[in-house]
Amino acid sequence: MVSALPGVSAPAVGEPAFVRRALIAVTVIFLGVFLFAPLAVIFASAFGQGVAAYFRSFQDPDTIAAIRLTLLAAAIAVPANVVFGVAAAWTIGKFEFVGKNVLISLIDLPFSVSPVVAGLIYVLLFGAQGVLGPWLTAHDIHIIFAVPGIVLATIFVTFPFVARELLPTMIAQGSDEEEASLTLGAGGWQTFMRVTLPNVRWALFYGVILCNARAMGEFGAVSVVSGHIRGLTNTMPLQIEVLYNDYQFVPAFAVASLLALLALATLVIKSFVEWRAGTTKEVTF
Amino acid sequence: MASRYHQGGNVLSITVANVTKRFGTFTALDDVSLEISAGRLVALLGPSGSGKTTLLRIIAGLEFAESGAIRFDGQDISDRAAGERRVGFVFQHYALFRHMTVFENVAFGLRVRPRGERPTRQQIRDRVGDLLDLIQLRSQAGRYPSQLSGGQRQRVALARALAVEPRVLLLDEPFGALDAKVRQELRRWLRQLHDDVGVTSVFVTHDQEEALEVADQVAVMNQGRIVQVGTPDEVYNHPANSFVYNFLGNVNLFHGRVDNGMTYINQDATGDLIFARPHALEITRNANGPNHFRATTKHINAAGPLVKIEVITEWGAPVHIEMAQERFRDLALNKGEEVYIIPRDLAIFEATHGDFTPSR
């Protein structure tokens, strides 16, 4: 027989009430000061001169060009990194080979390198004084201070997101299900499409969201390779800086509010992804 | 009845011919040969690392041997991919597709067939329905694997493997991850299922009881080799060597020597191996005849159909003895009592160049 000690009813891992309240208070204050207040300031400043002024901000051709360029960079960087991330996570998660740990470290490299350095790498490679510079100039190919450089820098900076999200899931799942699929007569491609990919779909989706958020919000690396040519090589974050430095606060905060909205949307989608769990399906024969 | 679950699949024999497989420097299978007749249920029995799972995976086409061949009905299929062999494979941890319902799991093998061979939706629905009836899980068709118990998952894995009408059914430790009660039920169920479906089946286990109870034939494996193949009766009662005897049940080991038909038991670790199963040793209060040794009772466990008693011999070694409850009551044994042990049946393996072979 097992019986509880008489008179002991508090949970084993219980802190006194004041400790709990203090911890909650610290968390709320911290979040308020560092997260909610800045967000509120962005929207307050953006709408500071009314809704009309806010929407007028988006009629500036340079701002429109910046939004376009940001969307373009993300539209190239995200699919590229999805392909790369799935391939890398699949290789690392399902196979054993020499140099696996080196590959994992390499994937993390963009996280550990400062974005400014990442941008400089491309300048040193493709810039006029760079390694490939003379050859590129001779063939009239513009990478640095042009759109290709911005896309390259964005790809570099966002490249760990998808692979990093997929790796733990793929490693944890092993390859039993793939083997089962093969013994049931499915081919390699069928197995990938019907078993491997659906099993990691939420991790993949999450990786894509994070990758996209960073692709649109990246400042440092893009700033180095951009050259800040208004209407040509400014992305949204760069345009925000330019506008702000010109004392155009409403347009600056209006564009900033777009990025903030993107972040909020990302959070909402992320919560939805995490909330969505397997539920029973009706099957009729 | 059988045709309902197994329409087109012809039952075939499996030949494993001189298969060798290495992982780095480790030899998982060392020149293994095995003949499995059509329609049999065969157990590959051995301790972990004996190569039994590797052999099963090579038969399935999930691993490939360095040398040797696998033949189905005499036809060499060594180079064929798993999908082309038409084997049903049941994984130790089920490997159900976690993002698919029970229904979709079972239907998978039918859905991935090339367009020309793919059954119609209605045919798939009928066949999956039949299989779900067979495993008594029709009501759970819409559930996901995570919502099922271990025993239910194992049955779904079996139904999924059977859906493709395999010519051979391979099971890797099919009951290893289940609790004792469910395991017992599923064992009988598997035996029944095999008798109904009739497909040649091979299962891997490290549990001798399971192998002896379920299989028609048992292949005992050790260190990458097959040590003995036979019916459960043959391997249990006529073990090929000391390893098989030792592996197929609880034993007490005595070292000793056989001389002129007389068996001498002593504690010295050289000489021949003398085994006694716990139920083949009798405890008495009075020694009559020369065949006995003295011991003191140390532990008595009377829970269960047999009473388990540990005694310490006069030379200080622990020995395990089992006896029926009635006999135990008649004896009225106490802990710490001095008793006589009479060996009723000893298995003697003579030391012949490193291997111990039976002495009869």
Image (tube, coloured by chain):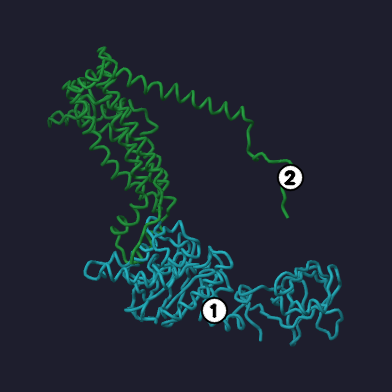
Q: How many numbered tags mark residues here?
A: 2
Question: What residue is shown with label 2?
Answer: A5
Percent position (x, y) of residue A215? Answer: 29, 33
Which residue appears at 68% of the width and 73% of the height?
B251
Which residue appears at 26% of the width and 41% of the height?
A80
Quarter of the image for residue B240 reads bottom right
Question: What subunit carries mark 2?
Answer: A
Q: Is residue A186 above or below residue A99?
A: below
Left or right of A87? Residue B333 is right
Question: What subunit carries mark 1?
Answer: B
Is the residue marked by circle 2 packed among few (<14), some (14-19), or many (20+) residues within 10 Å?
few
**Identity of the amino acid at label 2?**
Leu
Percent position (x, y) of residue B190? Answer: 48, 74
**Identity of the amino acid at label 1?**
Gln
- What label sits on residue B228 in the rendered view? 1
Numbered disc in front, either 2 or 1: 2
Q: Is residue B329 above or below residue A74?
A: below
- For the residue pair B346 and A187, the one nearer the viewer reads as A187
Quarter of the image for residue A70 reads top left
Quarter of the image for residue A245 reads top left
Left or right of B82? Residue B51 is right
Percent position (x, y) of residue B198? Answer: 42, 81
Query: Alpha carbon of mark 2 to alpha carbon of mark 1: how far?
Result: 58 Å
Please give the letter of the chain rendered in green: A
- For the residue pair A259 and B28, the one nearer the viewer reads as A259
Percent position (x, y) of residue B108? Answer: 33, 64
Q: Dot 2 lies on which element? A: loop
Q: In this view, does B142 lie above or below B229?
A: above
Chain B's shade in the image? Answer: cyan
- For the residue pair B42 and B131, the one nearer the viewer reads as B131
Left or right of B9? Residue B360 is right
Which residue appears at 61% of the width and 83% of the height?
B238
